[in-house]
Image (spheres, helix red, strand yellow):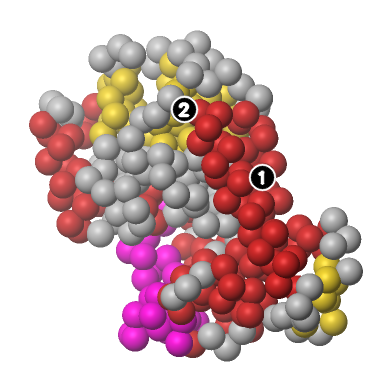
Amino acid sequence: MNTDFLFIKAEKSMWPASANIFAIKDDEGIILIEVGCGLRKFTRVLFKRLEGLDFKLDDLHTIVISHAHPDHMGAMSAFYKRINPADVKIIINEIEKESAQNIDLLNESFDINLIKQQNFESGVKEFFGDTFDINQSLGMFCSMSQLPDNAYIQTIKDNDVLQLGNYQFKVLTTPGHAPGHTSFYEMNHRFLLSGDLIGEIGTAWYSPSSGGAIGYLSSLEKVENFPIDYIYPSHGNKFSNVKERINQIRNKILIKDQIILENLKKGPHTILDLAKLLYKTTRAQAFPGVAIAEGHIIKLEKENKVERDNNLIFIV
């Protein structure tokens, strides 16, 4: 890899830590892919590291965002204190644009209403904290910053080709974790910026409104068709065991189908029952457990393996 591509790794790999950031130098200045979390302790570290790389904000002309989640674009507010929104182009998937401009929409793509429907207040409090009101904007809670009305935005879509400096990326819309989650495949150097789709460790959560289990599995299949030598994830280190990692994630998703079906053989369950089977703590059961369980039931319904009667789910 040439020195015109910089990998700015976050100190920690698990949420709510900031996402990794990538910088590309070109004749016009600097391009950033992701800007990281909006919490002050992260933005302070980010700007210090950028300064250490001889990065000048005056040289920044483009920011690319993989998806409108707080750990990926929350720091936009910190950048906009130092730059004019109209001067720096923001590139984002057309599906994610609306959420990037209206943080209240995160509650929809995170399927917060599913948790409300389960009346799972104990889990909500454990995950979000005692002061969190489930009716408030999740974006505000996560220190998210939305793009202002005068932001200079360019939208991209699936299969577009994006030229960033000397790098040519194929745009891959890969839902599951976010409706317009985007992975970027570098066509000449054969590497993937996988966002949250394929991490070094763990598996990203997925919710029905963001694509769910069906979307996630389809996205894995999509990227698997490309000759990828190594992956730069949004969380964790660069790695080259691409096929192995994709299979690990796929198997972790599919085993949830097996757990659900085996337990439904014993009798009907609610979504909350299934979330409690999939996750041990009330915190994880509330989020992402309820959303993930719902996503698997949608998948199994389409496969004619389960059916619902009011709030109860039965095996077919």
The tag on residue 217 is: 1
Q: Nearer the viewer, mark 1 or mark 2?
A: 2
**Viewer-nearest residue: 60 or 20:** 20
**Viewer-nearest residue: 261 or 66:** 261
The answer to whether residue 175 shows anywhere in this view is no
How far apart, in angstroms, are the residues tagged by discs 1 and 2?
Answer: 18 Å
Callout 1, which amino acid?
Leu
Would you say 300 lies left or right of 81 here? right
List x then y, in percent, for residue 170.
Answer: 57, 24
List x then y, in percent, for residue 99.
Answer: 53, 56
Residue that appears at 50% across and 11% down: 188
Quadrant placement of the C terminus: bottom right
Residue that appears at 51% across and 36% down: 245
The tag on residue 162 is: none
Q: Is residue 310 above or below residue 300?
A: below
**Viewer-nearest residue: 223 or 256:** 256
Residue under label 2: 241
Residue that appears at 40% across and 12% down: 166
Figure quadrant of residue 136: bottom left
List x then y, in percent, for residue 130.
Answer: 34, 86
Tag 2's secondary structure?
loop
Do labels 1 and 2 touch, CB within 8 Å? Answer: no
> Magenta includes 65?
no
Residue that appears at 64% across and 55% down: 255
Callout 2, which amino acid?
Asn
Would you say 78 lies left or right of 315 here? left
Q: Is residue 34 above or below residue 207?
A: above
Query: Magenta residues?
Result: 122-147
List x then y, in percent, for residue 26.
Answer: 32, 16
Q: Is residue 100 above or below residue 118?
A: above
> Magenta includes 131?
yes
Q: Earlier in the sequence, mark 1 or mark 2?
A: 1
